[in-house]
Image: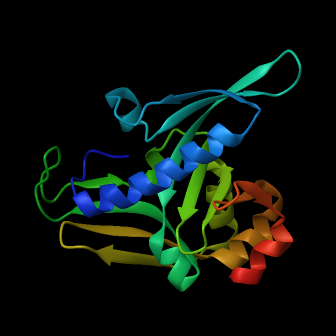
Amino acid sequence: MSTNYKDAKQNTIGEVGENKVLEYLSTDKRVVKITDVRYVDEYQKKDIDFIVKKQINKWDCKKYTVEVKTDVAAGTYGNFFFEKQVNYLKDTEKIKAGTIIQGWLYYSECDFFFIFVPKHKRIYIFRNDLIKKYIKKYFPPVRNHNDGYKKTYGWCVKMKHFIEKCGKGIVCIDTNTYKRIDIKDVFKNL
């Protein structure tokens, strides 16, 4: 979770998604360790929320980093919003008005994005580079959102198309049961 943008409502919504992901990770028997780095400056700058150590076979574990995004609008409109650029309109605690920064899609150093969509009660999991490959291949439209503090530009990606084209690289988790949903069944609620 970023501390650059101190909008309490946005942070609260983000924390709900982060907590859902923590609950899910704690139910995975292969996960041997979860390190919460949400409030560690070094990892905030890298846009990383958790470091996860997972058993991959009897002898070996693999470590990977996770960034959680909560996308409330995706449940209503059927689109993921992948942040490209942010233009700050007002001063914040750490950033001056007029500052333009890259969006999380470019500055996040995570291995995996976990996108929580509250209305669907689902977590969509995919590698960081999957989004960039999709955008390069399919050129989704760039949209913007102005919340009065910042103007955010990003790609508006139809969830159905993204899952259709990248399905093998996406894992979908039901947050009621924390069980994996077959990608073919994901389309039933989109």
* Identity of the residue furthest to the right in this view: 58
The image position of residue 163, as x and y in percent, is 74, 69
* Identity of the residue furthest to the front in this view: 177
Numbered disc total? 0
Residue 182 falls in image quadrant: bottom right
Residue at horizontal 56%, vertical 41%? 66
The image position of residue 95, as x and y in percent, is 17, 48
Q: Is residue 20 left or right of residue 170?
A: left
* Identity of the residue furthest to the top in this view: 59
Way the structure is coloured? rainbow
Q: Is residue 177 left or right of residue 51?
A: right
Residue situated in front as seen by the camera: 143 or 25: 25
Residue 115 falls in image quadrant: bottom right
Residue 146 visible somewhere in the drawing? yes
Q: Is residue 115 above or below residue 29?
A: below
Q: Is residue 42 above or below residue 137?
A: above
Residue 103 visible somewhere in the drawing? no
Q: What is the quadrant of the C terminus in the image?
A: bottom right
Residue situated in front as seen by the camera: 160 or 32: 32
The image position of residue 185, as x and y in percent, is 82, 74
Residue 167 falls in image quadrant: bottom right
Residue at horizontal 78%, vertical 70%? 165
Residue at horizontal 77%, vertical 32%? 30
The image position of residue 126, as x and y in percent, is 68, 52
Q: Is residue 164 left or right of residue 50?
A: right
